[in-house]
Image (cartoon, rainbow, N blue to C red):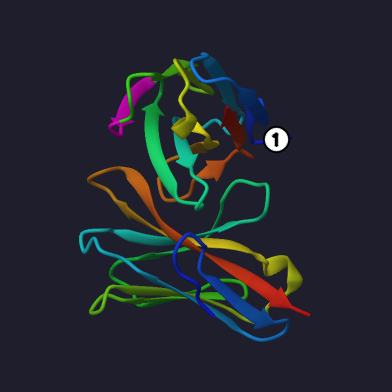
Amino acid sequence: DTAVSQTPKYLVTQMGNDKSIKCEQNLGHDTMYWYKQDSKKFLKIMFSYNNKELIINETVPNRFSPKSPDKAHLNLHINSLELGDSAVYFCASSAGQVRELFFGEGSRLTVL
Amino acid sequence: GESVGLHLPTLSVQEGDNSIINCAYSNSASDYFIWYKQESGKGPQFIIDIRSNMDKRQGQRVTVLLNKTVKHLSLQIAATQPGDSAVYFCAENSHRDDKIIFGKGTRLHILP
């Protein structure tokens, strides 16, 4: 059983399009995150939700909109995609100990 | 050796030798320091953490050392195996921010 699963694993799209990445965790965790990893492997936090409420928004452009329908799901919708959005997006979750994150396998987004 | 510019710093170690991966941090207010391992095509995975009031912590085949005077963190891997080949990230967590900030990664390459 996959603990944190993301779909799709790969996404290739044109500039200006809108796309979504879905994430689900079956660990019973209250907190979920989106991280962006660029081509230099740098991992940067984008958003965090605790029990469906937004608690961290790291100055991400308004084109990125997370949505948490319930505490087991955190989806990421991106409008008007730009070349610079190309990256691997990781979903993660945590229980009480924030320092131990459980990551999904990543969704590689390529904007042409 | 270490490469600069766009490339990830790389440490090459002979199989069976010990590996030492270093990290400098900047936030003196962090409560925990953490090491993550990211294998190719996968999400980062928690290895070990250390609280800021400690200077050493041991796990299975891994030891983390914290030197707060010079803001330095290291991960020592004993008897390095091919399965240790990955990118290793140090990270920080402060209970004030309730998030994990990742540092730059180091690629560990195992020589046969």
Q: Quadrant of residue A52?
A: top left
Is A57 magenta? The answer is yes
Residue wearing tag 1 = A2
Q: Nearer the viewer, residue A28 or A43?
A: A43
Q: Quadrant of the N terminus of chain A?
A: top right
Which residue is farthest right? B112
In x, y percent, where is residue A58? 30, 34
Q: Residue at the location (62% across, 76% down)? A: B61
Q: Residue at the location (40% across, 18% down)? A: A65
Disc 1 marks a residue whose amino acid type is Thr
Q: Which residues are magenta?
A: A53-59
Examine the residues drawn in magenta and state their main secondary structure. strand
Is A16 magenta? The answer is no
Q: Residue at the location (31% across, 42% down)? A: B98
Is residue B79 something that shows in the picture?
Answer: no
Is residue B7 something that shows in the picture?
Answer: yes
Q: Nearer the viewer, residue B86 or A99?
A: B86
Q: Is residue A71 above or below residue A95?
A: above
Q: Is residue B62 above or below residue A20?
A: below
